[in-house]
Structures are given as C-alpha cells and as structure tokens.
Image: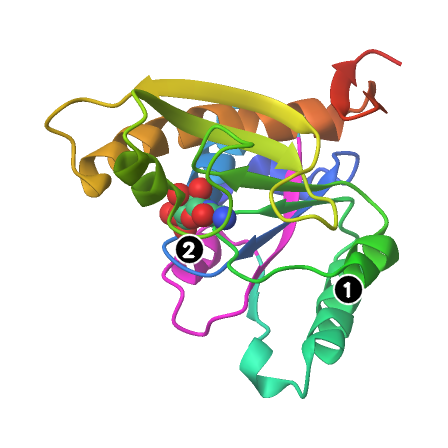
Amino acid sequence: MPIERNLPATDTSLPVLGVLISGRGSNLRALMTAIDEGRLRARIGVVISNRPDAAGLAHASSAGVPAVVIDHKAFGGRADFEDALVARLGEAGVQVVCLAGFMRILSPVFLERFGGPVLNVHPSLLPSFVGVDAQRQAWEHGVKVAGVTVHLVTPELDAGPIVAQAAVPVLDDDTPETLAARILVEEHRIYPAAVALVAAGGWRIEGRRFVRGR
Ligand code: GAR
C-alpha cells in the first residue's frame, strides 16, 4: 500500500487508534484498508506487537504506520509489561485500543489506566466458545451456525458488551480451518465497521448492552 494513499494518517482531527497484535495481522490490514477507503474515519497512531516475529508488523511499516515490539517476555511480570503498553499508547495519543489477534489477557489495571474503549474481535458468537481456538471449539461442539463477535473489553475474558456480530453456516464437510477462513471474511467486514461506530462516539452502555445514541 503506497504511503501517500494513507492520507487520513496525517489528519490530526481524527480519532487515534492503537492496534495490538500478536501474529498474522489480517485484521490490522482490514482496518488499514477501511481507513484508506474512507469507511473508517480514524488514524492509527501506533501498532504494538508483543511478539517480535509477528507478520503484521510489516503491514504497518509498509503503510508508514509506526510499529513497535513490546515483548512481554522482556518484562518481569504483567504489571511492567502493561506499564510499557500504557506508556507507548499514551505517547501516540491513542484514544481507542483495537485488539487484533492480540493473544495476551489485559488486566483490570491496564483497562483502568488506559481509560478509553478497548475493542476485541473474537472468532465465535459470544458468549459461546471463549478463549483460544474458538473456531475449533465451535467445530468440535458441532454447532450449525458459527461466527464472529466484536466486543468491548472488560476484566472478564471475552465477556464485555457486544458491539457487532456476524454469523456463518457450519457445513458438513468443514474442517476447523475452512470454518476459520469463512469466519475471517466476516471479521474483516465487521471489525472496521464496529471500530468506526465506537470511534465516532454517540453510544452508551445500558447494563450489558451496547446501545447507539446518547
Ligand atoms: C483472528 O481470527 C481473531 O479473531 C483471533 O485471532 C485471529 C488473528 O488473526 N483472535 C482471538 O482468538 C482472540 N481471542 P489476524 O492476526 O490475522 O488478525
């Protein structure tokens, strides 16, 4: 992606996103494409990977987005790792954190200290199949409908208010891999849309429910 096409990144009036990754980075790429195409009015202030070998780092760098490694293994414990995350997000002026395949659990202290909305994309129809390998969990359980959820992150794992969901069929000849690929198409469609909704503001939480309107 040519840097000069990434014009919104220079517009300081846009909400600033921080994208946290651990691997492939296809959801990061979907967010960058949505920004490029004007479907997501925001700019990415920083991409942070907790793994030095994350392929997603290259997507960010090639688009001129600052990409840094904060390796959790380099810290004595979770508190120090999260201190470093909060500091880097603060330096970049991040207002909304987007977890995009970020495979570390964030503590209540992180959520409190960051203070803004933290979004996650999870490859199941929550509240079913929390945690790792959700697509395989759904396949093994034998559900006939699977999908993806975008939710606000709260201290309880994969349990925060739901912003958006999309369903896909589970076919008789699916494998966990073919099911995951079908879900991923929907992840790339709904995550940028949900981030746009949250970054634009004009929403509230009622009980467990994410509701549009003030
Ligand atoms: C995606 O399928 C995402 O939903 C999942 O990891 C993958 C990351 O892919 N996240 C979780 O399972 C979080 N619990 P990506 O690096 O290509 O975006």
* Ligand 1 within 8 angstroms of badge 1 C-beta: no
Query: Within the magenta stretch, is there residue 192?
Result: no
The circle drawn on residue 62 is 2
Query: Which element type, helix, strand or loop, lies under badge 1?
Result: helix
In the rendered image, is residue 180 in sight? no
Whether 110 is drawn above or below 38: the answer is below
Quadrant containing the C terminus in the rendered view? top right
The spot of residue 140 in percent (x, y) is: 27, 39
Asked whether residue 31 appears in the rendered view, the answer is: yes
Foreground of the two, 113 or 17: 113
Amino acid found under the numbered disc labelled 2:
Ser
Task: Quadrant for the N terminus, please.
Answer: top left
Q: Residue at x 38, y 72 (%)?
A: 53
Q: Is residue 97 left or right of residue 86?
A: left
Q: Which residues are magenta?
A: 42-65
Q: CA distance from mark 2 to mark 1?
A: 24 Å
> Residue 71: x percent and y percent?
55, 77
Q: Which residue is mark 1?
A: 86
Query: Residue 81, located in which quarter of the rendered image?
Result: bottom right
